Image (tube, helix red, strand yellow):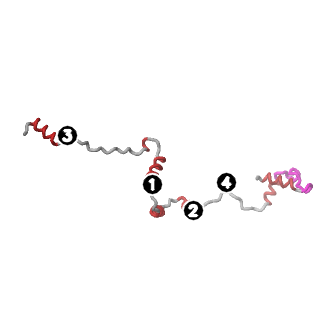
Amino acid sequence: MSASLLRRGLELLEAPGRGKAPPGLTEGRDGPRAAGAARRRKRAPEPRRNKATVKGRVVKSVIEEYHKKKAVNHLRANLQYMLKGQFVANKAITEQVLAQNRGRKAKDQPPKKMAKKKPEGTVFTEEDFRKFEREYFGRP
């Protein structure tokens, strides 16, 4: 609430006839500016707030701000937490979670597993090879 609204509200609540005279009638002998200057001189010097700052802002210590924003190493606490738990999630569930968090771009996809090639079995037997060797090379 602004000071002017508060002042108007108080004026409305005052008893009739006891209010202040209108501001134009209270001028000093040298005019309105001289009366205002005299009032300003009379007023006791009060500690003034810094007008350059935002209203309600508290000055903070630079050292405290530095300590707040300084990086903290959480490695020890995280290791204790991870080593304490013995619960191991189901592999199917972990795969499902990883699939949900994976992007759709090709670079986000895991490499496709290549199927292991089975050693191809031969159609020919050892006897067939010996027979071919005899016929082709002429060896007995």
Please tell me whether residue 135 is drawn above or below residue 6 in the rendered image: above
- Tag 2: Cα neighbours inside 10 Å, few (<14), some, or many (≥20)? few
The residue under label 1 is: 90
Q: Nearer the viewer, residue 81 or 74?
A: 81
Instruction: Tell me the SS state at disc 3.
Output: loop
- Tag 4 secondary structure: loop
In the rendered structure, which disc, 1 or 3, sits on the residue that comes first in sequence?
1
Q: Secondary structure at mark 2?
A: helix
Q: Who comes first in sequence, dot 3 or dot 4?
A: 4
Residue occupying image coordinates x 18% and y 41%: 125
97 relative position to 5: left or right: left
Query: Closer to the observer: label 4 or label 1?
Result: 1
Q: What is the secondary structure assignment of the residue under circle 1? A: loop
Query: In the image shown, does 42 or 30 lie closer to the viewer?
Result: 42
C-alpha span from label 3 to label 2: 84 Å
Residue that numbered label 3 is attached to: 124
Residue 89 position, x and y percent, is 46, 56
Which residues make up the magenta segment? 15-34
Tell me the amino acid under the disc marked 2.
Answer: Glu
Q: Which residue is mark 4?
A: 54
For the residues carrying marks 2 and 1, which lies nearer the camera in this image?
Answer: 1
Q: Is tag 2's residue or tag 4's residue first in the polypeptide sequence?
A: 4
| Residue located beneath label 2 in the image | 64
Residue type highlighted by circle 4: Val
Disc 3 versus disc 4: nearer the observer:
3
Closer to us: 135 or 77? 135
User: CA separation, marks 1 and 3?
Assistant: 47 Å
Horizontal side of residue 40 vs 63, given as left or right: right
